[in-house]
Amino acid sequence: MAEQVSSYPEIAPLKLHVPEPGCRPGDTPDFSEFEIPRAGAVPKPELDASADDMLDLAFSIIRVLNKEGEAVGPWVDDLSPDDLKQGLRHMMLLRAYDTRMMTAQRQGKTSFYMQHRGEEAVSCAFQVALKKGDMNFPTYRQAGLLIAGGYPMEKMMNQIYSNEADPLHGRQMPVLFSAKDYGFFSISGNLGTQYIQAVGWAMASAIRHDSKIAAAWVGDGATAEGDIHSAMVFASTYKAPIVMNIVNNQWAISTFQGIARGGAGTFASRGHGFGIPSVRVDGNDYLAVYAVAKWAALRARSGFGPTIIEYVTYRAGGHSSSDDPSAYRGSAEGAAWPLGDPIERLKQHLITLGAWTEERHVQAEAEVMDEVKFIQKQAEAIGTLTSGHLPSGRDMFEGVYEIMPPHLVRQRREAGY
């Protein structure tokens, strides 16, 4: 038999492609390729618009506040100056709370903490657009949902300190809150799982002919989890009454957003493959977040099914108290982030309206910090990780089974409870 000769040319050995961020430690931050549409330029679709009708919104960014601090365009909503002051206060409370809890972690009063700095508008504004009875399925960086929802901050601190007044009795890691009555589903450390849980909850609400909707939350890194795609299939197929939130803060634990995004242009564009209407919003624009959240929530409540919202924001701090971001990104990158700071931007809008001043803002910052310090003293008087009153060991046996099985009864007795 004659020897076959390959007609293929010689090809160099394969190499694995690993995407790289635009800025590493020591580099000068460069966001020149980051396209920011003019505030007010993105149209507002009708509630019943299909995914095909609004394809472009998955690649643009909805913005309301312009550089002068004015609210412009079709997404300007019905928030009054008093509503905006309340929103500013929520964000300031969250930032002061972050500051005090991070310091407490460094002092050994708790084992772990995760900050929200730079992302305060996302959760604080979103919560205001919901109704009582709606259920959030959050990650660890949406404490603003609780603060804007009126949940007692002392309870949040007690949970972080794992003291005797911890509403979860020491059964969860610090910052993994749970508050059913406030529409805050217990946080799962296994990221991505809350997406499919939220879709199931939303489907159950529809089956009961209820009026409540669900809101699922995930970060950019966890969108690569399989549960996210399973959730999108079910949400799309059954038109589940749900808002599916993706907080794109540019960085997962230590990898930039390009790793999880893959070849897609944006995270929101993934919804196109499932026929889900998808939009991107300026996550540092309180007014834009509120308007988009209100629109998507009303879509879900009106029976038009799911919406995907990608919040374009920036994680200004480390991933957690265990993380040193200087190891993987430039130290000046946060300051160069072109969408600015959410608190500063809302403050400037209120000043533009004549409803706020620089002097009043400085005073408000001091008032908020004093309030948070006072609450912290109350929580620490009960106990911290290393002092005071801790939850009873008995609690580890309770709340698992409706009727405790004999082997746990025996173990509890042996433990002295």
Image (tube, grey):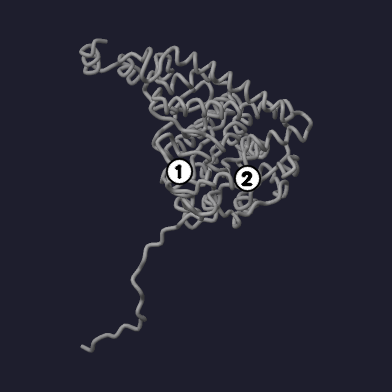
Is 70 placed left or right of 133 in the picture?
A: right
- Residue in the picture at 42% in, 28% down: 106
Q: Residue furthest bottom?
A: 2
Left-right relation of 246 to 75: left
- Residue 195: image x %, image y %? 47, 38
Q: Nearer the viewer, residue 135 or 347?
A: 347
* The N terminus sits in image quarter: bottom left
Q: Residue 316 placed where, x, y %?
A: 53, 40
Which disc number belongs to residue 33? none
| Identity, as a three-letter code, of the amino acid under mark 1 | Pro
- x%, y% of residue 341? 62, 39
- The residue closer to the viewer here, 371 or 84, is 371
Total numbered labels placed on residues in the image: 2
Residue at which label 2 appears: 339
Looking at the image, residue 417 sits to the left or right of residue 122; the answer is: left
> Which class describes the residues within 10 Å of circle 2: few (<14), some (14-19), or many (20+)?
some
Q: Residue at x 45, y 19 (%)?
A: 158
Quadrant of the rendering where the C terminus is positioned: top left
Closest to the observer: 199 or 354? Answer: 354
Res. 346 in view = yes
**First-in-chain label (1 vs 2):** 1
Q: Quadrant of residue 94?
A: top right
> Residue 70: which quarter of the image?
top right
Q: Looking at the picture, which amino acid does disc 2 mark?
A: Leu
Secondary structure beneath label 2: loop
Q: Residues within 10 Å of mark 1 (few under 14, many from 20)?
A: some
Between tags 1 and 2, which lies in front?
1
Query: Does residue 278 show up?
Result: no
Mark 1 → mark 2, Cα distance in angstroms: 20 Å
Q: Secondary structure at mark 1?
A: helix
Say which residue label 1 marks.
325
Residue at 65%, 29% (x, y): give it.
Answer: 88
